[in-house]
Image (spheres, rainbow, N blue to C red):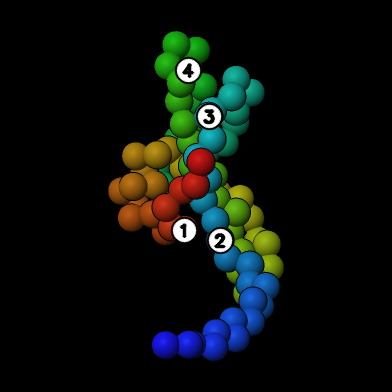
Amino acid sequence: MATKSATKTKKKWRSRAVTRTVDAGNSAYCAVCDELIKFRARIRADQIICNVYVANKWDRVEHFHPECYKKAKAPYGNPAD
Ligand SMILES: [Zn+2]
């Protein structure tokens, strides 16, 4: 079965989430619980960073605690590493 797939790749900017370690100078607040995402020296803390696009244009960056992001049901998809 030969299927002709004419897949046109239109560039669409979609909001994306990534997982990043929290660094020492971090001063971002979680978009869900409004608490500072704190750097902790002893444990490797992660945060979720989302580039949010609205109407195909970059709008803002949102930060989340990984737990909060999960609780919010991953609004921008599963975070990539
Ligand atoms: Zn939070």
Give residue 16's quadrant in the image.
bottom right
- Marked residue nearer the N-terminal end (1 or 3): 3
Q: To which residue does mark 3 refer?
A: 21
SS of the residue under disc 1: loop
Q: Residues within 10 Å of mark 3 (few under 14, many from 20)?
A: few
Q: To which residue does mark 1 refer?
A: 76
Report the residue at 54% width, 35% height from top: 20
- Frontmost of labels 3 and 4 is 3
- Marked residue nearer the N-terminal end (3 or 2): 2
Q: How many marks?
A: 4
Distance Cα–Cα, label 2 vs label 4: 28 Å
Residue 40, numbered circle: 4
- Marked residue nearer the N-terminal end (2 or 4): 2
Distance Cα–Cα, label 2 vs label 1: 6 Å
- Kind of residue at disc 4: Arg
Image side of residue 39 versus residue 78, left or right: right
Report the residue at 42% width, 88% height from top: 1
